[in-house]
Structures are given as structure tokens and as C-alpha cells.
Image (cartoon, grey):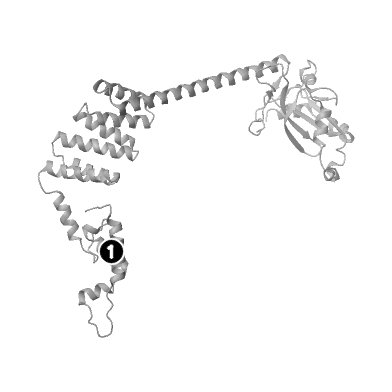
């Protein structure tokens, strides 16, 4: 098959000229001969299909004759490709591959070089060139592993082939195998330490390794910072005399919702605590992701009651304008949280002990008119049992 770069343009021009010069006999003029007359009646697409079956005009391989048979001209060209001595055949495929490579038709070039190798001509110089050239194509196609393998086969034949060394080093660099690239570059420098191409690769390798070192240092510092801040938080909770009870099945919190220090590097800054606000008389709840330990239940009530008037018109919420706050104790009982008492005073008190639950505050807000009834129904045993759920 003959492939010519300018073929498409020439073919388009040929079709255009055919349309302009198509013979249409006028009155009294003779008809075309049968063969030409038949051609004149063919649509342009069919003419192009016929042209594409001629090796000189092919833009893509067509192995048919248009009538279900073989394209004899193509088969003849195929047969010619395998005429001659094995070294001549392999050399011919190499030259065709080189032509495709120059035209940047790398996949076609790979096929020709592979056919050349399949001949197994037994000539080291030809085989080394076929492997070397195929490695160049695979490098362009970003088939880095194949490029490395081809370069390796070339180096088995010609251990000091600097082009094969260069291509394998470049491929190893592309797949971030820096140690392998370094070894090849060191070996290459012992053969040719003046090559500008190798010097460029050495600089690229050094730049990549420097970036990796910087990234690794950033990762290490970030990990150290994370561990230090984790330790600071643990210490801050401990010095405040807070305790936290872990439940068997803790509540799932939104990402980023967790107890933290206002300044994670200073244990003396205030703790910010996610808080579950429960309304037991209506079986509702709110999750407030950030509540300062220095705030009070009165502050919290003011926040949750900041709602439109329509909320209080709901029969469930008619008593919500006057709420009282309660917190669960370590033993399963209840305390009333004074509206002016800060949470850090409640959580840090030695008696009664009011814990965090999975490092989260839990507070019950009950309408004042219903609080006595609700408290009378509270069960320590039930409360303790819920912690195991």
C-alpha cells in the first residue's frame, strides 16, 4: 500500500475537476463510449470508492475489488513486500517504518518495524535498528513500558547505544521510576558525558526529585502538626476535667463537625463543642456544630428560638417560648442547667459529673409547663441502656 501525504488534496482536486469536466452530450453530439458513459453516470462517492481500491490513490486500506473478490493489486504489493533475502525484507520494512515515522504516523510505523522483526533476518544491526526505532514510536505514543522493553532489546544487541539509553531513561522518568532513570543516566554519562539531551534529562530528574522531597517534607510537617494538635485537644479536655462517654453506636456527624480548640496550637483558648439539642416532648432535635464552652444554656435557648412566628403557631410548639435546659449525668440522672451558668462550669464540675457523649454536648430543652411531667418519666436505667445502643 502506498501512502502519500498530499494524496487527499490531490484526490479532492481530481473529483472537483471531474465534476467540472463531466461530459454531457448536447443535441446532435455523439454519446460517450460504453465504458466512459458508465463512468459518467456514477455518483461521486462510487467513483471515490473505485479510486480508493487503486494502491496509488488509497487513503485507507481496501482489500476488496468492489464485487466481493480480492483486490489483486493490493495482494500483489503484499507479495512484493516479502520478496528477496530475509535481511532485504527486514530492511524494506524498516525503511517503510522510517517513512511513516517522519510523517508522524507512529502506529503505522510500529506495524512496519514489528513486521521487520518478525522476519527474524539474523542481522544484529538491522534488528537493533528496528527495536530502537520502534522504541521511538512507543515513546511518542506514550507507551512507556513498550518503549522501555524495545530499548532493552536494542541494548542487548548494542549495549552502548546512547539513543536506546536516552529513550529508556526518558520513559522511566515519565512513569516516575526515578531510581531506574538515574541508573541509566549514570551509565550513559560513562559512555558520553557531553550529550546535551542527557544533561536535560539529568536536570529534569533532579527537579522531579526536589519536588518529591519538598512534598514529602510538607506531608511530614502536616502529619506532625496533626498529631500535635490532636495531643493539644486531648490535653485541653483533660486539664478542664471534662469526661467523654463513647457510645456503642455514635451519631453520624457532618464532615468537619468535631470538638476543637479555637486555636488548635493553644490549649488555653476556648473549646468549641458540637451540640445535640433535643426536644423530647415533640421528638425533635437540632444539631449545632459550634457551641463555645463559655456560653450558657440561656445563650443556646436564644439561638434555637430565633425562628419565624409561624414556628410557634404550630400546636406542637405553643409552649416553646419558655424553655428549660437539662443535661444528663454520668450516672444516668438529670441536672437542670442554669441559664446563666457556663457550660465549662457544668462539664468541669466534680459532682455531679456531666459528660460529653462522643465528644459532643447533649442538652434537653423542655417547655417549662411540661418539665415536671417529663422529669417524672425520666428513667436512669433506660438512659444508661441507651448508651449501649
Q: Is residue 59 visible?
A: no
| Percent coordinates x, y for residue 129 in the rendering | 20, 36
> Compared with residue 51, is residue 311 higher up or lower down, i.e. above or below?
above
Question: In this image, 277 relative to 206: left or right?
Answer: right
Residue 288 at x, y percent in the picture: 73, 32
Residue 42, compared with residue 378, is above or below; it is below
Say whether residue 51 is left or right of residue 383: left
Name the residue beneath numbered marker 1: 14
Q: Nearer the viewer, residue 152 or 167?
A: 167
Quadrant of residue 74 within the rendered picture = bottom left
Q: Name the residue at 24% across, 35% down.
A: 132
Q: Is residue 317 above or below residue 253?
A: below
Q: Residue furthest left?
A: 85
Instruction: For label 1, count other residues whose C-alpha is less than 10 Å away and answer few (under 14), some (14-19) or many (20+).
Output: few
Q: State the residue lying farthest toward the top.
A: 239
Which quadrant does the C terminus fall into?
Answer: top right
Look at the numbered disc 1 and give the secondary structure of its residue.
helix
Position of residue 57 measured from the top left corner of the image (x, y, whole percent): 24, 59
Q: Residue furthest bottom?
A: 28
Residue 29, compared with residue 345, is above or below; it is below
User: Which residue occupies the foreground of this view, 17 or 313?
Assistant: 17
Residue 82 seen from this side: yes
Q: Residue shown at 24%/74% (left/top)?
A: 38
- Residue at 86% from the left image edge and 45% from the top image edge: 313
x and y, in percent, of residue 353 in the image = 77, 19
The front one of 165 and 269 is 165
Amino acid at each position: 500500500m502506498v501512502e502519500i501525504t498530499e494524496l487527499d488534496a490531490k484526490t479532492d482536486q481530481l473529483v472537483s475537476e471531474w465534476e467540472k469536466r463531466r461530459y454531457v452530450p448536447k443535441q446532435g453530439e455523439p454519446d460517450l463510449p460504453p465504458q466512459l458513459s458508465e463512468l459518467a453516470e456514477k455518483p461521486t462517492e462510487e467513483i471515490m470508492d473505485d479510486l480508493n481500491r487503486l494502491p496509488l490513490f488509497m487513503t485507507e486500506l481496501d482489500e476488496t475489488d468492489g464485487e466481493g473478490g480480492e483486490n489483486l493489486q493490493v495482494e500483489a504489493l503484499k507479495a512484493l513486500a516479502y520478496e528477496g533475502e530475509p535481511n532485504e525484507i527486514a530492511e524494506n520494512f524498516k525503511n517503510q517504518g522510517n517513512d511513516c515515522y517522519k510523517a508522524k504516523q507512529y502506529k503505522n510505523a510500529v506495524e512496519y518495524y514489528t513486521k521487520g522483526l518478525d522476519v527474524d533476518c539474523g542481522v544484529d544491526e538491522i534488528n537493533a535498528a528496528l527495536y530502537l526505532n520502534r522504541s521511538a514510536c512507543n515513546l511518542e505514543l506514550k507507551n512507556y513500558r513498550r518503549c522501555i522493553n524495545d530499548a532493552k532489546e536494542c541494548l542487548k544487541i548494542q549495549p552502548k547505544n546512547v539513543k536506546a539509553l536516552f529513550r529508556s531513561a526518558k520513559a522511566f522518568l515519565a512513569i516516575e521510576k526515578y531510581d531506574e532513570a538515574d541508573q541509566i543516566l549514570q551509565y550513559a554519562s560513562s559512555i558520553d558525558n557531553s550529550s546535551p539531551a542527557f544533561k536535560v534529562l539529568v536536570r529534569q530528574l533532579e527537579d522531579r526529585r526536589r519536588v518529591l522531597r519538598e512534598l514529602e517534607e510538607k506531608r511530614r510537617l502536616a502529619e506532625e502538626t496533626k498529631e500535635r494538635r490532636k495531643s493539644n485537644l486531648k490535653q485541653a479536655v483533660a486539664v478542664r476535667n471534662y469526661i467523654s462517654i463513647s457510645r456503642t453506636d455514635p451519631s453520624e456527624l457532618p464532615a468537619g463537625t468535631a470538638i476543637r480548640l479555637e486555636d488548635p496550637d493553644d490549649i488555653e483558648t476556648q473549646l468549641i463543642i458540637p451540640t445535640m439539642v433535643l426536644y423530647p416532648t415533640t421528638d425533635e432535635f437540632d444539631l449545632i456544630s459550634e457551641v463555645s464552652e463559655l456560653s450558657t444554656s440561656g445563650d443556646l435557648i436564644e439561638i434555637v428560638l430565633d425562628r419565624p412566628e409561624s414556628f410557634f403557631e404550630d400546636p406542637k410548639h405553643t409552649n416553646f417560648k419558655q424553655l428549660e435546659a437539662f443535661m444528663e449525668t454520668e450516672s444516668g440522672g438529670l441536672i437542670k442547667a442554669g441559664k446563666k451558668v457556663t457550660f465549662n462550669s457544668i462539664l468541669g464540675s466534680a459532682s455531679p459529673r456531666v459528660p460529653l457523649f462522643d465528644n459532643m454536648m447533649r442538652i434537653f430543652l423542655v417547655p417549662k409547663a411540661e418539665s415536671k411531667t417529663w422529669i417524672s418519666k425520666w428513667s436512669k436505667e433506660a438512659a444508661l441502656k441507651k448508651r449501649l445502643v
